[in-house]
Structure formats: structure tokens, C-alpha cells
Amino acid sequence: MERPDNRTIWNNASVTGLVLGLICIAYMLLSLLTVLPGGMVTTFLNFALWLCKFIGCIAVMRLAMMKFASANPGASNADTRKLGIFSALLSAIIVAGFNLVSILFITPEAMQETVNAVLSQYAGMLDTNTMNSVEQMMGKLPAITFFSNLIYCFLYGTVLSAILSSNIPSKNPFDRIDGAQTTDNQ
């Protein structure tokens, strides 16, 4: 059985990464709609949305790895881990890019309100020089958010792919390393 090449892995990873990215974008858009004044119901709704996204991303990654392993009989656990890592990278780029667009163009006033609330909360504790430094840093907040989101999503996906790929494809402890069948000599 022939192992899949990097092109095959990247092709599968691009589809998986796109699906994972779209799930996360749908979550972000739905959570924007649930910004309602209200306590417990809004909190529960946001938690339910996050839980659906969390479980959905795990299920999509696992399903993609299993489908890849069944379509490529020569695939090893390392190949499925590569698929997961590449998918994580692509989805992280999509999610971080959409989050940047959201911060800069869709909801820039929400970001400014959050920054103003934080600055007003700490204004009494900080001196003028520190406040000026913090205000200057806030101009770089979209870039900081982009890269931190990119790194977080990639690391999460990498850890998830390492965990899931350990048994995809399933290992047969009775197979020899070279794939030859063992026979009993009588």
C-alpha cells in the first residue's frame, strides 16, 4: 500500500480547514447576534453556542481524519496527524483573518467601547505615562489580536490532531512492522 503524498494531504486539509473555519465564523456571527441585555439566558445561549462549536470542531476533525484514512489505505498515524496540523493551520488563518475583519470593519465600535471601559477602569491606578503607553498599544490591538488568535487556533488544532491521530488509522498490534502476515509453523 502506498502512502499518500503531501499534495493529497494538503488537498484534504484545505477542505477540512475551510469547514473548521466556517464553523468558527458561524459561531462568531451568532455570538454577535446574542449580545442582548439580559443575564442568565444570554450567558446560557452563549455557552451553548460555544459548546456546539467546540464539539463540532472535534467531530469534523475526527471525521476528516477517518475519511482520509479510509480513502488512503497506506496512510499512517503520522499522515493523519499531518492532515490535522495542516487543517489547523488553514482554519487558524481563516478564523484569525475573519476576526481581524470583524474588529476593523464589522464591529469597530464594540472594540473601542471595550478599550475605553478597560482604560477607565484602570485610570485611577496608572500614572499619565503608563496611560499614554497603554493608549498607544491599543492602536496595535487588532494586530495583537490577529496573531494571538492565529497562534491559539493553530496550537489547539495541533494538539487536537495529535490526540485524534494516535488511533486513526487504528493500529493492529498483530501486524508485523513490514506488513507481512505471520504464519504458524506446525
Image (cartoon, rainbow, N blue to C red):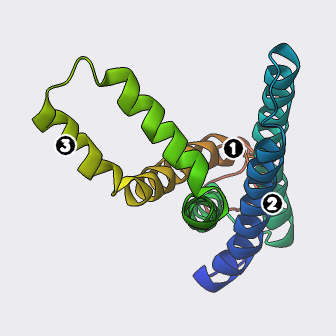
Quarter-of-image position of residue 6: bottom right
> Which residue occupies the foreground of this view, 152 or 70?
152
> Which residue occupies the foreground of this view, 128 or 186?
128
Mark nearest the camera among 3 and 2 is 3
Q: Position of residue 83 (x, y in %)?
A: 64, 64
> Which residue occupies the foreground of this view, 64 or 35?
35
The circle drawn on residue 164 is: 1
Image quadrant occupied by the C terminus: top right
Q: Position of residue 113 (x, y in %)?
A: 53, 41
Task: Give the mark, 3 or 2, whose residue is nearer the N terminus.
Answer: 2
- Given the image, on which type of amino acid does mark 2 rest? Ala
Task: Left or right? Give the position of 12 relative to 10.
Answer: right
- Given the image, on which type of amino acid does mark 3 rest? Asn
Q: CA distance from mark 3 to mark 2?
A: 48 Å
Q: Residue at x 44, y 38 (%)?
A: 116
Q: Which residue is label 2 attached to? A: 64
Image quadrant occupied by the N terminus: bottom right
